[in-house]
């Protein structure tokens, strides 16, 4: 079973409507809250897009060069759902997800717009507007191939290894089911993704991710979101 299925299935069964990720960007003042069902929907659209447009199969590499953001979570969960091996470098990857600053041939450009809008200007030649294109894909994903536990998922680590490591990090950080976790950890690969994204999700916690954190605003975010656990960079 894919990493994404193992993460999302118990959460969807418990309550698809409950918040899963709340994303703040202190540089823009934005706040976006996504439920388990909404995050699963974005992951499904991404997985369908990867399979339909790039023929991604279990073990194929997909490069992700993105900051901590709710759209990055959709990209990562979608890639893992179809069995992709997430890597930081574009060489040898089926497609590379990048920011507007890195766009070029054979890239999927992620706008990081807080409201989920696509690029405000046309993508450069050979680049694709991820949000505008992936949103047209199906809302549900049915894998064409099984994703065994020994499939590489995050650099050289397999699905089973990633899941075990994320659970261990959740335990060592004191994250329990239902906790609300305030995090400023950047999602570099693999350490940041394991600690800042996967540890809270494997524990069944609500992640409150703060990008471009303003130290003067963190207490306010913590109070507003009733966060009881901190993961501070």
Image: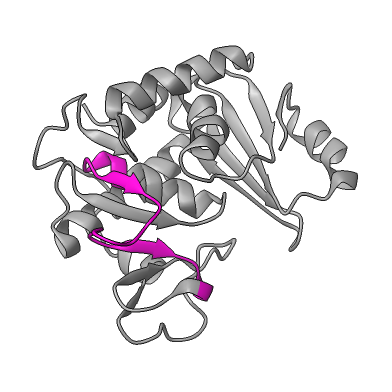
Looking at the picture, how far across and down is residue 18, in whole percent?
Answer: 53, 31
- Residue 144, position as x, y percentages in the image: 9, 42
For the point 34% across and 62% down, the residue is 96
- Which residue is situated farthest in the left direction here? 145
Q: Is residue 225 above or below residue 118?
A: above
Whether residue 52 is situated above or below residue 19 in the rendered picture: below
Q: Nearer the viewer, residue 192 or 50?
A: 192
Decide whether residue 78 is among the magenta residues.
no
In the rendered structure, the answer to whether residue 147 lies left or right of residue 195 reads left
Query: Residue placed at 42% from the left, 49% from the top?
Result: 74
Of residues 31 and 162, the one drawn nearer to the viewer in this rendering: 162
Left or right: 152 as drawn, with respect to 146: right
Magenta segment: does it hold 88? yes
For residue 3, which quarter of the picture? top left
Q: Residue at x 40, y 52 (%)?
A: 88
Q: Is residue 122 above or below residue 151?
A: below
Q: Which residues are magenta?
A: 79-101
Residue 150, position in %: x, y?
20, 26
Residue 201 appears anywhere in the view: yes
> Would residue 130 appear left or right of 27 to someone viewing this image?
left
- The C terminus - image quarter: top right
Q: Nearer the viewer, residue 62 or 201?
A: 62
Q: Position of residue 100 (x, y in %)?
A: 50, 74
Instruction: Check the image and tell me how it is coloured.
Output: one colour
For the question of whether residue 135 can be seen, the reply is no
């Amino acid at each position: 079973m894919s990493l994404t299925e193992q993460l999302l299935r118990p959460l969807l069964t418990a309550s698809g409507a409950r918040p899963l990720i709340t994303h703040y960007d202190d540089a823009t003042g934005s706040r976006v809250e996504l439920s388990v069902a909404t995050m699963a929907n974005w992951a499904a659209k991404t997985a369908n897009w990867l399979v339909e447009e790039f023929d991604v199969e279990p073990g194929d590499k997909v490069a992700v060069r993105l900051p901590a953001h709710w759209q990055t979570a959709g990209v990562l969960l979608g890639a893992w759902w179809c069995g992709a091996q997430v890597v930081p470098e574009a060489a040898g990857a089926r497609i590379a997800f990048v920011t507007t600053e890195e766009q070029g041939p054979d890239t999927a450009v992620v706008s990081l717009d807080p409201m989920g809008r696509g690029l405000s200007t046309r993508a450069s030649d050979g680049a694709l507007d991820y949000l505008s294109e992936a949103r047209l894909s199906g809302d549900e994903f049915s894998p064409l191939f099984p994703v065994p536990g020994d499939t590489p998922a995050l650099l050289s680590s397999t699905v089973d290894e990633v899941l075990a490591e994320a659970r261990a990090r959740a335990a060592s950080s004191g994250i329990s089911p239902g906790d609300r976790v305030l995090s400023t950890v950047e999602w570099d690969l693999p350490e940041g993704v394991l600690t800042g994204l996967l540890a809270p999700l494997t524990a069944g916690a609500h992640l409150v991710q703060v990008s471009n954190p303003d130290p003067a605003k963190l207490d306010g975010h913590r109070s507003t979101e009733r966060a009881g656990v901190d993961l501070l960079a």
